[in-house]
Amino acid sequence: MSVEQNDSMAKHQHALIEVTDAARWFDVSPPWIERVFARKPRATLKAVDGVSFSIRKGETLALVGESGCGKSTLARLLVGLYSLTTGRIQFDGESLDRMQQPGGLAMRKRLQMIFQDPYASLNPRWRVGRIIAEPMLAHTDLTADQRAGRVDELLIQVGLHPTDRNRYPHQFSGGQRQRISIARALAVNPDFLVCDEPTSALDVSVQAQVLNIMKDLQRRLGLTYLFISHNLAVVHHMADRVGVMYLGRIVEIADRDELFERPKHPYTRMLLAAIPDISGQGSVRTAVSGEVPNPLNPPSGCTFHPRCPHARDKCKQQAPILSTFSGAEVACHAVIEAWPQ
């Protein structure tokens, strides 16, 4: 057995999340009366289209990409909020379909999510104590006193005071609300947290505080993160590995330092070139060229080819698959053909 096969087997043996050819399509067709009388065709949005990756226990995989590329849809697939159109997702060796079956609560409590908007994700009519304790009612047999004690413990863990349990969400700042969201996600001792742009609605100084709390909790509790963000500086701070998405597909996955220092896919290079330089060394910021195509009518072949400086006829006809090159997985015909065999 080759070294690469041994490495692959070791990777999969330690994978907490295993995603294989996952797809989620939405029927966005106009109402039937318009289809009949105005002759408007049916339409399908392929929000996630054939995505495969794994996340090892205790690591942080970050997903980046422009708005509308499918990151949030993929996040909801991983916690069971959306069902798969095709493909397979396994959590700790078991199919995620088990969450929908009798006895699936045991799996469901091990996967939790921190949402993007701390102003919309907390019930404004409930006190903080009830918000944090709610998951415990569904997933544990704790008594009322035990739940109250657990709420106080969680508030302290995220940098708030136990007396905050008696206040309402509107009495807190955005950063404090996101800490409450983190406490709620941790209430039932999950193993895996999906973090969907958890700091994008916060001020920069507050972002740093929340991110440091998340890293500290991961270290102390052994958590595994899928971290979604469009802020590459935040990704560099949080991630062990980074996946780059474009129009519902992953075009590159690599270790964080490998991706930032030696990006291989043209789209990844364009994203990194667009980062503003504040070092004062005179680097020029390069804007990402073109616009994301209409996802209801994506380009044929490689969907990035209309914006790619290396596009050729093959790119317009055939979609590339993820192939491994020097520690990274890349879906690009130009990279595959240029790499020494």
Image (spheres, rainbow, N blue to C red):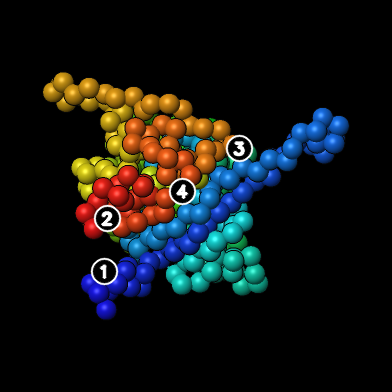
Local packing at callout 3 (Cα closer than 10 Å; few below 14, some 14-19, many 20+) is: few
Task: Work out whether 28 lies above or below 202.
Answer: below
Whole-percent x and y of residue 105? 58, 67
Per the model, the C-alpha gap separating discs 4 and 1 is 25 Å
Whole-percent x and y of residue 15? 38, 67
- Observer-nearest residue: 332 or 259? 332
Count of picture labels: 4
Name which residue lies at 28% across and 44% down. 264
- Observer-nearest residue: 220 or 326? 326
Per the model, the C-alpha gap separating discs 2 and 3 is 31 Å
Looking at the image, is mark 2 or mark 1 earlier in the sequence? 1
Local packing at callout 1 (Cα closer than 10 Å; few below 14, some 14-19, many 20+) is: few
**Residue 272 appears anywhere in the view:** yes
Q: Which residue is mark 1?
A: 4
- Left or right: 76 in relation to 288: right
Per the model, the C-alpha gap separating discs 4 and 2 is 18 Å
Picture quadrant where residue 33 is located: top right
Whole-percent x and y of residue 273? 28, 31
Q: Which residue is mark 2?
A: 325
Looking at the image, is mark 2 or mark 3 earlier in the sequence? 3
Per the model, the C-alpha gap separating discs 1 and 3 is 38 Å
Task: Work out whether 329 lies above or below 285.
Answer: below
Local packing at callout 2 (Cα closer than 10 Å; few below 14, some 14-19, many 20+) is: some
Labels 3 & 4 near each other (Cβ < 8 A): no
Mark carried by residue 296: 3
The amino acid type of the residue labelled 3 equals Leu
Labels 4 & 1 near each other (Cβ < 8 A): no
Q: Which residue is mark 4?
A: 319
Label 2 SS: strand
